[in-house]
Image (tube, coloured by chain):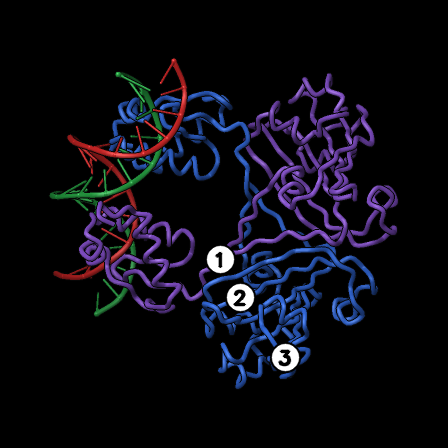
Chain colours: A purple, B blue, C red, D green
Amino acid sequence: MAGRASFRDIRDEMARRIAARVWQPGAIIPAEEELAREFGSARATVNRALQELARAGIVERKRKAGTRVALHPVREARFVIPLVRQEIEAEGRAYRYRLLGRAIEPAPADIRAALGLAGARRMLHLRCLHLADERPWQVEDRWINLAAVPAARAETFETIGPNEWLVHNAPISRADFVFRAARASAVEADALGLDVGEAVFVGERMTWLGQEPVTHVRMVHPPTHTLRTSV
Amino acid sequence: MAGRASFRDIRDEMARRIAARVWQPGAIIPAEEELAREFGSARATVNRALQELARAGIVERKRKAGTRVALHPVREARFVIPLVRQEIEAEGRAYRYRLLGRAIEPAPADIRAALGLAGARRMLHLRCLHLADERPWQVEDRWINLAAVPAARAETFETIGPNEWLVHNAPISRADFVFRAARASAVEADALGLDVGEAVFVGERMTWLGQEPVTHVRMVHPPTHTLRTSV
DNA sequence: GAGTGGTCTAGACCACTCA
DNA sequence: GAGTGGTCTAGACCACTCC
């Protein structure tokens, strides 16, 4: 603390005061200039610290009105989207991957619609199983647009999962995610060792590079799976 | 464009170049000083623009090495957590709320565990139905810690939902979220007009003010419901 | 009108990391 | 060692909004 205070120090100290309710929910906190004097820094530094707190939803700022502690700091939740392998290994479990099927065939209408592809198009269709400690964790049903990723045609995907392969071989610029509950189809139930009709947690991801669709993946998990976050 | 370029203008112009692949995925882009010359701004302004792109995962920055366009801009997804009313009205549908049950009773062990409450404790238990265009949208099963929110004891919750009431009456400092798939219980199926055992999409939220638990809510949706985001 | 946050500039020094 | 990003300062002007 001998040197200059960084915006991080100031941000953390202000967050501490809010958490300790030195500054109470709903209360106005001192203006930037006053805080700058207190912390012995430039106003711009305090401003940066406060902007980070505002972006996190911890404070709310209005010109002239000042800065006040938010009553409800949580307005959004963020989920990191890890590779399956990392997700499993982060839990300290052994990861294993198995290819269930590989074909080049016309994509069904719902996949084409989700990707915004007009007309029938032959795509690379992969079905994979991801296991944690030898227990089924996720069934993956993936369609890859060979026009966007021609190199995928030469890859067998027998030892590397499409997700990991694509990360290194297919840049993207945009992605959509959808999460839902569904009943397990016969094929999914079989792969996951569940009863047909059991509730499964389904994630879908669609990616594009510019205007060109890259891939669509449907990830099906047993009902024990959860998506969680903390704010 | 006659005046000074703002960091927003610069950020958007750089994002445009990346989207248009003028700057290709994986490529190094010019250094801050050079960009500052090009845009006729201070280096700090370019720095702020680039930091926003880096925070969004669109570029990756390293000292000495420079700034390069990310191959995989998506590492996390953000979901806004709206009030049910806003969620329904944003879809242009009519919102209606109905209280199904209200009682002060001991909280079950799983609720106490999720909130980190030791020992049995009597809490305010509410069951509510939220409808969109008169069709069941969400069943809400909520427990409120009366020690943290004593004013809730005097509220009937017959005309205002607990979520909206709490937003105005109970500040919080932290929240956890969990999403999962489950099979509808008899009570849930009845409220939502589903068959027992149908797959439902379940969200749970737990909130705290400092160390004190505020509320636990379990939100159950029909399987048509999805959680979606776009990056 | 006046108070507060929002942003820009110009310059400086530092921290990291590559060669 | 040197190039690049990271951050801070001091000052300025602007934009918004409350009174």
Which numbered marker is on residue B9?
A: none
Residue B22 in sight from this viewpoint: no
- Foreground pick, A63 / A81: A81
Image quadrant assignment for residue A63: bottom left
Is the Cβ of the residue at disc 2 closer than 8 Å to that at disc 1?
A: no
Q: What residue is shown with label 3? A: B120
- Foreground pick, A148 / B97: A148
Residue A41 in sight from this viewpoint: yes
Question: Horizontally, is A153 left or right of C11 in the view?
Answer: right
- Element assignment for label 3: loop
- Label 2 or label 3, whichever comes before in sequence order: 3
In the image, residue A34 above or below residue A130? below
Q: Residues within 10 Å of mark 2 (few under 14, many from 20)?
A: many
Is the Cβ of the residue at disc 3 closer than 8 Å to that at disc 1?
A: no
In the image, residue B7 above or below residue B184? above
| Disc 3 versus disc 1: nearer the observer | 3
Instruction: Identify the chain of the residue marked 3, using the numbered disc in the image.
Output: B
| Disc 2 versus disc 3: nearer the observer | 3
- Element assignment for label 2: strand
Q: What residue is shown with label 1? A: A75
Question: Horizontally, is B193 left or right of A209 in the view?
Answer: right
Question: Horizontally, is B167 left or right of B188 in the view?
Answer: left
Instruction: Identify the chain of the residue marked 1, using the numbered disc in the image.
Output: A
Instruction: Identify the chain of the residue marked 2, using the numbered disc in the image.
Output: B
In the image, residue B222 above or below residue A212? below
Q: Residues within 10 Å of mark 3 (few under 14, many from 20)?
A: few
* Marks 2/3: CA–CA distance: 19 Å
- Foreground pick, A2 / A126: A2
Q: Residue furthest bottom?
A: B154
Inspect the image, locate mark 3, and give the three-letter code of the amino acid beneath it: Ala
Q: What residue is shown with label 2? A: B207
- In x, y percent, where is residue B219? 65, 64
